[in-house]
């Protein structure tokens, strides 16, 4: 069954009629036991016989690269090859999917870029040899500081209407602030890894990737072969967060080396390479201006941002994505500039755009609430747009108000004393803060196949599960429609021999590939109903029995010993031209700020979210927890420091780049406001993977301000910055 989402927003709400009690429940991950017992084999763990081991070599600086001691390296014990292939040094750019990355030159475009691969009989020999490689570098060095170069305007993100300067001049209340956010990294637990082997002119690569159908084309493009000759396997992925969206050097290098050696090759990035060899989130500089009337209603808003990337890279952090639709204001100035510099390639990292853009904007909204002497929740409630403020089209649904109200209620928001520095416990200032959350909802083309036999069903798609719960959710969808318990449904993922799913990116995996599974299972229901001579809507499938009206027949009899195969194919269509579609939420945080050290501890945090139908309550909650934890990191600790001379990441390990650990994270509360968005697809589910991070950091920053009166605009709010504010 195929569905083009130009359908009119009236897709039938069948999931509510079926009521089998499988979809939506907090079902455990079917592969959970394998994962916690170490039996789920990740990319680097399942080695073919005769496998060799490769280690990438990174350039310490920009420039044309030569290997000065190549012959010596080749003679080292166990070394099989030194590969310095220009195709291999490409970056994993993500601006255009399907096409190979653009930095395809025999040149290190930035310090830290992979430039060679050493292959040996053992991992240890490869590592030793890679560490012994001497590189010669020469050539012009490009700029590395985004503030020091001429920038180029990005047309795609521009929106100008009215006269913001005039609105600012005549407003009752204004905010004019510059926020900055540092480079950040995806930091998945499982490093990038690939094992490649050839069979004639066909290559198979077991890798840790998010978007197999695109990665297959990208790899084929790098290797100069037909994508039919590439098979990718990613059955388990230990976190992606964006760095694994595009094909990256370890996979390309492994494939090139395996072809050259005629043996399988494994390449794993070590933790320090995980910072520079794969893409980072761009640093941003954001000039935010807000103008409001005496009632706190926005009359003007400005969001002018600067981001960076390497020359020619198509991606630029879409910082203002949420700003375009979040709040109404007649006078608007939204623009973006890109600085072309030679720091590691910038790409998507969890909630590209909103993660940093909503966070800063929501901090600025808190500044406006303070300027207007208004409660921050009330300020948001007064600024809920009736339609998309720029395109003029309606919202498919708008759930900001219910999430704000429910979140505030559950958190006990209105008990707060609005005064700054009103609560103190010993050395600690205590305060609360809130922020709204927005993330655009995207449906992405996806296909899936469901095979039904009398004994159960098999779901097949190349979709990945990057820790998000795809195995569980797709199992539930098929189970719900076919009346099968979870243990009778087997879900097979992460293999490009299977129908192409949507891939795991942009929060769209569950709703998009899930819709394809839905349609495939619907086709099966239709065919069973036809065989029984009844309407699909009248059909009940349960425990191997099919019931239509007062006729019940065993499924086995209907199938006659055969299996029935359904195909599902969902396409985005033009629904987004008619409606603006987003997910919404509200974050609330309580922090304690130490008056002596400037240290901030988050004491409790609560998020209330709406993302259409919640397909699995447990995995959805887990996604929101993860997002909120990232928000704590963004607010308090995470940030790459670039060396001012080379652009190199100075703190390229998890000791110096601090992602929040258990000790940093208080009990997190997550609540969902269920909604049915008829435009969201046949299941009425929207993406939730990235919503939890959007704005989360702002709730923490705003709480710091409420606690101790210090407004941090240069993220993260490390103790030195907070202390400097306290001492003012
Ligand atoms: Mo996401 S940053 O689209 O993996």
Image (tube, grey):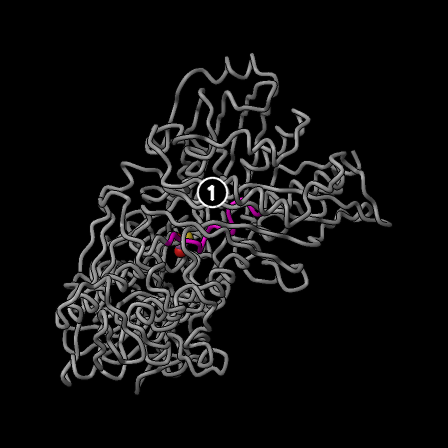
Does the magenta-highlighted stretch encompass residue 695? Answer: yes
User: Percent from the top left, x then y, of residue 533?
Assistant: 13, 69
Q: Residue at x 45, y 47 (%)?
A: 343
The quadrant of the picture showing ligand 1 is bottom left
Q: Which residues are magenta?
A: 685-696
Q: Is residue 120 above or below residue 60?
A: below
Which residue does the numbered mark 1 point to in the structure image?
399
Q: Secondary structure at mark 1?
A: loop
Q: Is residue 389 visible?
A: yes
Q: Residue at x 44, y 81 (%)?
A: 34
Q: Is residue 169 left or right of residue 480?
A: right
Q: Is residue 673 left or right of residue 48?
A: right
Q: Viewer-proximal residue, 675 or 166? A: 675
User: Percent from the top left, x then y, of residue 48?
Assistant: 31, 84
Q: How many marks?
A: 1
Q: Residue at x 31, y 54 (%)?
A: 13
Main secondary structure found in the magenta portion: loop
Q: Is residue 125 above or below residue 580?
A: below
């Amino acid at each position: 069954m195929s569905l083009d989402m130009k359908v009119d927003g009236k897709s039938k709400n069948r999931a509510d009629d079926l009521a089998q009690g499988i979809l939506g429940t907090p079902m455990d991950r079917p592969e959970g036991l394998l994962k916690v017992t170490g039996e789920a084999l990740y990319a680097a763990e399942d080695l073919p016989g005769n496998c060799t081991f490769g280690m990438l070599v990174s350039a310490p600086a920009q420039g044309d690269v030569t290997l000065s001691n190549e012959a010596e390296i080749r003679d080292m014990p166990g070394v099989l090859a030194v590969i310095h292939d220009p195709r291999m040094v490409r970056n994993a750019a993500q601006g255009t999917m399907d096409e190979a990355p653009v930095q395809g030159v025999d040149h290190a475009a930035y310090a830290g870029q992979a430039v060679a691969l050493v292959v040996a009989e053992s991992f240890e020999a490869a590592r030793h040899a890679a560490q012994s490689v001497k590189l010669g570098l020469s050539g012009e060095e490009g700029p590395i500081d985004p503030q020091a170069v001429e920038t180029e305007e990005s047309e795609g993100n521009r929106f100008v209407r009215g006269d913001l300067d005039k609105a600012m001049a005549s407003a009752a209340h204004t905010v004019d602030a510059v926020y900055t956010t540092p480079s950040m990294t995806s930091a998945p637990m499982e490093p990038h890894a690939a094992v490649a082997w050839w069979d004639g002119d066909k290559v198979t690569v077991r890798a840790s990737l998010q978007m197999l159908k695109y990665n297959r084309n990208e790899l084929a493009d790098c290797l100069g072969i037909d994508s039919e000759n590439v098979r990718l396997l990613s059955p388990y992925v230990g976190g992606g967060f964006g760095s694994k969206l595009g094909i990256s050097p370890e996979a390309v290098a492994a494939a090139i080396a395996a072809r050259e050696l005629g043996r399988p090759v494994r390449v794993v990035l070590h933790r320090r390479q995980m910072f520079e060899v794969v893409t980072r989130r761009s640093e941003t500089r954001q000039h935010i201006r807000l103008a409001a009337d005496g009632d706190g209603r926005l009359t003007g808003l400005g969001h002018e941002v600067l981001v960076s990337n390497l020359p020619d890279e198509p991606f630029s952090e879409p910082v203002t994505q949420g700003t375009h639709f979040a709040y109404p204001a007649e006078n608007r100035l939204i623009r973006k500039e890109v600085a072309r510099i030679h720091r590691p390639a910038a790409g998507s990292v969890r909630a590209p755009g909103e993660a940093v853009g909503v966070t800063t904007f929501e901090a600025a909204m808190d500044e406006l609430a303070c300027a207007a002497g208004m409660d921050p929740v009330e300020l948001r409630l007064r600024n809920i747009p009736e339609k998309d403020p720029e395109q003029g089209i309606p919202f498919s649904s708008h759930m900001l108000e219910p999430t704000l109200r429910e979140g505030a209620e559950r958190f006990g928001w209105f008990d707060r004393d609005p005064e700054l520095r009103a609560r103190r416990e010993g050395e600690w200032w205590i305060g609360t803060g809130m922020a709204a959350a927005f993330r655009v909802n995207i449906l992405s083309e996806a296909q899936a196949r469901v095979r039904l036999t009398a004994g159960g069903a098999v779901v097949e798609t190349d979709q990945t599960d990057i820790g998000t719960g795809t195995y569980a959710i797709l199992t539930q969808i098929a189970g719900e429609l076919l009346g099968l318990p979870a243990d009778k449904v087997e879900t097979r993922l992460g293999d490009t021999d299977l129908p192409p799913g949507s891939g795991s990116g942009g929060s769209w995996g569950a709703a998009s590939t899930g819709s394809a599974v839905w349609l495939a299972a619907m086709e099966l229901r239709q065919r069973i109903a036809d065989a029984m001579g009844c309407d699909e809507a009248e059909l009940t499938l349960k425990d191997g029995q099919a019931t239509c009206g007062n006729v019940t027949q065993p499924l086995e009899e209907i199938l006659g010993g055969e299996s029935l195969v359904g195909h599902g194919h969902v396409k985005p269509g033009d629904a987004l031209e008619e409606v603006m579609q987003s997910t919404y939420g509200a974050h609330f945080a309580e922090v304690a700020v130490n008056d002596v050290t400037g240290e901030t501890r988050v004491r409790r945090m609560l998020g209330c979210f709406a993302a259409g139908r919640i397909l699995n309550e447990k995995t959805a909650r887990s996604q929101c927890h993860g997002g909120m934890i990232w928000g704590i990191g963004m607010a308090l600790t995470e940030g790459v420091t670039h060396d001012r001379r080379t652009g190199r990441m100075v703190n390229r390990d998890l000791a110096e780049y601090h992602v929040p650990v258990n000790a940093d994270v208080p009990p997190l509360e997550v609540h969902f406001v269920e909604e049915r968005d008829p435009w969201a697809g046949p299941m009425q589910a929207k993406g939730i993977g990235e919503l939890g991070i959007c704005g989360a950091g702002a709730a923490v920053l705003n709480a710091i301000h409420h606690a101790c009166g210090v407004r941090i605009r240069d993220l993260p709010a490390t103790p030195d910055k907070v202390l400097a504010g306290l001492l003012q």
